[in-house]
Amino acid sequence: MTNLDYGIIGNGKSAALISKSGALEWLCLPVFDSASVFAKILDSEKGGSFEFVTDDDYKYTQRYLPKTNILSTIYSNGTDSFEVLDFMPRYHYHNGREQIYSPPDVIRYIKLKSGKPKFRIDYNPRLEYAERKTITEVRKEYVKSFTRSGTYDSLYLYTNINMDKVINGQEVELEHDAYFLISYNQKLLKQSIERAYLKLQRTKVYWLNWSEETHRFSEYNNEILRSALVLKLLSFDKTGAVLAAATTSLPETIGEIRNWDYRFCWLRDASMVIKIMTKIGHWKSAERFMNFIIDVVSDKDEKMQIMYGINKEKNLRERILTHLSGYENSAPVRIGNAAYKQKQHDIYGILMDVIYQQFSLFEVSLQNSEELWTITRSIVRIVRKNWRKPDRGIWEIRTDQRHFVFSKLLCWVAIDRAIKVAELIKNQHYVEQWGKLRDTISKDIMKKGWNEEVQSFTQAYGSKDLDASTLLMEAYGFIDATDYRYISTVKATQKELSRNGLMYRYRNRDDFGLPTSSFTICTFWLIQALNKIGERNQARELFDQLLTYSNHVGLFSEDIDFESKRLLGNFPQAYSHLALIETAMLFSKDIELKSKF
């Protein structure tokens, strides 16, 4: 059985996945949602990869350099050893004003550690999702890979190792440090080992400084910081968009068809991420995301989508790449995501929650405050018009529209946070006007969302099925943790949806049958809810257990198999890592509150 034993590297423009053995198996250039240049993770035969091949007597270990997104893989046979440091360059530079250098490049810096290690290079790029043949040729200063048919694409490889040996897979004996630079662009400056080393050091300094700006906590600080570093990698600098994950089509269950492209910005996921990033000290991320929201909802009558492309695209047409076999033969491989057409009423509350957070932190000094106040009033209009209607819910049911309790709850949150914003800006007229709507929605949820027979809030009005999302009712301020209905909901939901210490989202049949894997964020939600109702020891025990299910470098995907505990689903998952931080903070104290201005 394989696991998602990958590390992620990135620089705010794109990201790459490096396997535990040092194989580069997923990379899209020039940006996150571009076509892949390496995609072995989605097809071991056709996808393409960049690997170091050693004799069997070499063992390998992998870790991140502390407080960075630089991945270290050490190969050693006891006598001969070398280290590969993988990173995508990201650092500050001055060109009249301070800027960030983050090119569409991957650098693999090879550090000689001892002896005379030998290895072969398996360099096999497959451009444009491997839909057409890729030709690789040695040129004077670089190796160029390109397509001749279909969509034209190209890739450049620079190195101080003999290029003919590289592309022919011949054995190389390492006598000094070496480097590989993979770039979407042809380089204007001559590349060298010295230049690669300088980029390594400057990138390391960038990440150390970024980590230093992250609040420190009394417990679980390493786990919080690693998750924060992951969330930073899933942020697209150019627009402020936050991706749900770096991959497409990694299956929720092996052999099933629940495979989706997550390289987009869901307003729900992104808003949750930004709320957490703000709490741990990274307020600039929030500022960029607020600008993204203002841009995509620029008109007062703009229909708000649940998700957008990272460059603010609205049409995310979904298609299937039939030539790829999928992760462990779990087809289909999809690019694009048809869910962009769905109506999900919960996005209004989640977005208003983060808008209120920004208003409460910055008040008058908040940039774009007038634009956000306009969006606030637009959201209230949308909720007033639509909250009584059914939708597809947080779990994006593709066929059935229902009156989901979580959607109603988040409509209430939208109005509640809008009222709080109005109070902050001292606009009493709106406070009084919107208060009636908030009360109406609250009474409706209490009347129709609570099921007396099962003694719990349920997935949807008139249903007996339970749903993990109702565990968030207290966290959003809808109900008190001491209310018997919330306590009963937590206990009933745990009993119904928990299995081997992990949580289903729900257990009832959906578009694709009965769910079979746990949903990682739901387990974090259960832990948070148990802690809130006083079951602190049980919550801590479940949390410590859940942390052991991360991969070898502390990363989580979307799902975990109930029995084997293997990671499943797209990877690494923003949802999972934001929930990890949020949960860890319940058990920790912020021991360093620093000004970030």
Image (cartoon, grey):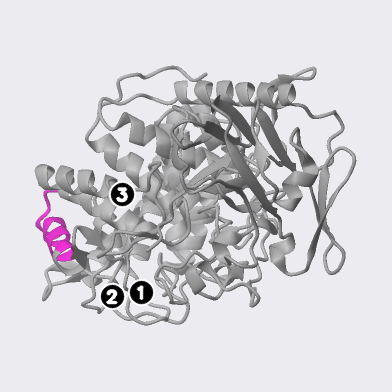
Q: Which mark is residue 461?
A: 2
| Residue beneath the point at 49% across and 73% down | 330
Q: CA distance from mark 1 to mark 2?
A: 6 Å
Q: Are marks 3 and 1 in contact (CB under 8 Å)?
A: no
Task: Classify residue 176 by image quadrant.
Answer: top right
| Residue beneath the point at 25% across and 78% down | 463
Query: Residue 86 at what x, y percent from top left?
Result: 58, 37
Q: CA distance from mark 3 to mark 2?
A: 20 Å
What span is colored magenta in the figure?
Answer: 481-494
Q: Is residue 176 above or below residue 170?
A: above
**Front-most of residues 81 and 526:** 81
Q: CA distance from mark 3 to mark 1?
A: 19 Å
Q: Indicate left or right for 88 with 1 as reference.
A: right
Q: Is residue 380 above or below residue 197?
A: below
Q: Indicate left or right for 499 with 393 as reference.
A: left
Which type of secondary structure does the marked residue at label 1 adopt? loop
Which type of secondary structure does the marked residue at label 3 adopt? loop
Query: Residue 423 at what x, y percent from top left?
Result: 40, 37
Write down the residue under mark 3.
Answer: 476
Which type of secondary structure does the marked residue at label 2 adopt? loop
Q: Is residue 88 above or below residue 378?
A: above
Q: Are marks 3 and 2 in contact (CB under 8 Å)?
A: no
| Residue beneath the point at 29% across and 70% down | 506
Q: Amino acid at mark 3?
A: Tyr
